Amino acid sequence: MILKRKPEIRGSKTLTVIAEGVTVEGKINSPGSTRIDGTVKGELISDKEIIIGKEGRVNANVQTKDAVIAGTFNGEMNASGEVEISSSGKFIGNLIQKDALLTISKGGLFKGESIVSQGNSIPNINNSRQILEEKS
């Protein structure tokens, strides 16, 4: 008997998708890219990038390399790479980056504090509150 293997879908092991209508509460740790078209509350760590679609809603502490925000983000984000807020995107909270790589398209909203950290690496989520308190 020959066993048939299911064909692998390219990239399926490195893409996490939270579909529209889905709500996730808690901690998500994604080894690849993460796309959110639903709602996420809690903590989100993505090794590659986070994409928040137009219908996506995120109320969380986030640690990622890159981020594209077309929906609504509310919380604290640590990003080691680029952060882009599209014309439909809303970012409310604090952004901490190693380098100032923030792009806001016309119509996009950024309400909060953008902090460029000093040193070779960005602080993790647990240490970022300390930086904010030290600046006060």
Image (cartoon, grey):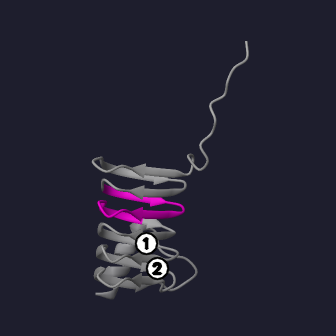
- Per the image, label 2 sits on a secondary structure element best described as strand
Disc ID at residue 66 = none
Q: Is residue 76 left or right of residue 49?
A: left
Q: Which amino acid does label 1 sit on?
A: Asn
Looking at the image, is 76 positioned above or below residue 43? below
Q: Which amino acid does label 2 sit on?
A: Gln
Residue at 32% over, 83% down: 113
Give the residue at mark 2.
Answer: 97
> Which of these two is toward me, 71 or 99?
71
- Per the image, label 1 sits on a secondary structure element best described as strand
> Which of these two is toward me, 106 or 82?
106
The quadrant holding residue 78 is: bottom left
Magenta residues, dominant SS class: strand
Residue at 48% over, 83% down: 101
Residue 91 picture location, percent across and down:
30, 74
Q: Residues within 10 Å of mark 2 (few under 14, many from 20)?
A: many
Q: Which of the image's four quarters has the N terminus?
A: top right
Residue 98 picture location, percent across and down:
51, 81
Residue at 46% over, 79% down: 97
Q: Give the range drawn in magenta.
A: 41-62
Disc ID at residue 78 = 1
Looking at the image, is 116 positioned above or below residue 52? below
